[in-house]
Amino acid sequence: MTDYLKKELIEKLCTIISSSRKILIVTHTNPDGDAMGSVTAMMHFLLSKNKESLITIPNNYPEYLSFLDPDKSIVIYKNDNATVDEYLLDCDLIIALDFNQLKRVDELEKGIRESKAKKILIDHHPSPEDAPFDLVISTTEISSTCELLYWLLISIENWINSGQPANLTSATADSLYVGLMTDTNNFSNSVLSSTFRMASGLLSLGVDKEKLQHYVFGGFTESRMRLLGYLLQKKMVILWEYGAGYIILTKEEQREFEFNEGDSEGFVNMPLNIRGVTISALFTESEESIRVSLRSIDDFSVNRLARRFFNGGGHERAAGGKLFISIDKVPEYFKMSLKKSIKL
């Protein structure tokens, strides 16, 4: 379950954190539940150890995850780069969570690379970028970064307390459960036996799973629900010859349905509910590019598809990337990518 968490690694992690005075916590652009869960869990854990920390993310988080930031203490770099840049100059530790390449923090990349602070990477994506970091804790054999972080924090507690039972705070536990729940799509994928042991451990700490599930998977705005209905009725395309489906969300449609960041969470999975569809894609148009989300439910690697055709990467069954073409060219481009990747 935790064979990758060697005693020497835990001791090094504890030494770096305990000797640090001011800690910057960062995650990737367009943060999802695992990203937000891991950074807020780390912040709460450090607070319980009387450590000063600041969370920054490249751009805003989805509205449905705002309950993880009730005091609005997370600094959005796009909106307030001066505060983060000043903190970067003085901090002595940077903890990076839920991404494998520094380019995934967009405009934050330069400042982090140039910082003299020690740097730790904690992640579960393939091919982590080792060079900029003093310590890399990474494995793909786990459901989420929040699960990896859970076992890390439990190990740290055991190390600090000389083997006594670990006791994470309720705020830390809530954040970890959110990341676990979202990255497994409510325990429907990427689940291992250790995943359920983690969930059991968090519930024993008092996590209210029904409340968190409502925050994350319910309580949507009327416009978001109408957008989903519209996309399923008008925009979902099934390519039966490839066992694939896709949805394109244009800028005009986003304006019409008062789209907010995060409103499309879960949309990419919709075609996979159709019998015979095993590959799915969501293409979301923005001013600079087209965001690509890819999913599969068989042995087809969307990670390889994303790397080869969509300037991205990820997991074998969940990946993403970007396109720099006009939105009207996406259907043919997607079909071309499938044709070159699937032997019919």
Image (spheres, helix red, strand yellow):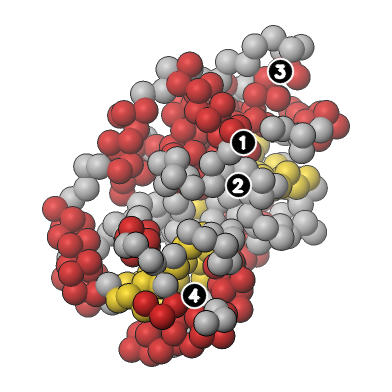
3D distance between C-alphas at marks 3 and 4: 42 Å
| 329 vs 204: above or below | below
Q: Determine whether, in the image, residue 167 is placed left or right of residue 232.
A: right
Task: Please tell me which residue lies in front, 126 or 187.
Answer: 187
Q: Residue 291: image x %, image y %?
A: 43, 71
| 342 vs 316: above or below | below
Q: In the rendered structure, which disc, 4 or 2, sits on the residue that comes first in sequence?
A: 2
Q: In the rendered structure, which disc, 1 or 3, sits on the residue that comes first in sequence?
A: 1
Q: Are marks 3 and 4 in contact (CB under 8 Å)?
A: no
Q: Are marks 2 and 1 in contact (CB under 8 Å)?
A: yes
Secondary structure under badge 2? strand
3D distance between C-alphas at marks 2 and 1: 9 Å
Residue denoted by label 2: 97
| 269 vs 199: above or below | below
Type of the residue with mark 3: Asn
Residue 124 visible, this orientation: yes
The residue mark sitting in front, 3 or 2, is 3
The dot on residue 149 is 1
Type of the residue with mark 4: Lys
Type of the residue with mark 2: Leu
Q: Residue at x 30, y 43 (%)?
A: 217
3D distance between C-alphas at marks 4 and 2: 21 Å
Task: Please tell me which residue lies in front, 298 or 92.
Answer: 298
Residue 42 visible, this orientation: no
Q: In the rendered structure, which disc, 3 or 2, sits on the residue that comes first in sequence?
A: 2
Q: Residue at x 42, y 72 (%)?
A: 243
Corner quadrant of residue 112: bottom right
Q: In the rendered structure, which disc, 2 or 1, sits on the residue that comes first in sequence?
A: 2
Residue denoted by label 4: 322
| 38 vs 296: above or below | above
Q: Residue at x 44, y 51 (%)?
A: 32
Q: Are marks 4 and 2 in contact (CB under 8 Å)?
A: no
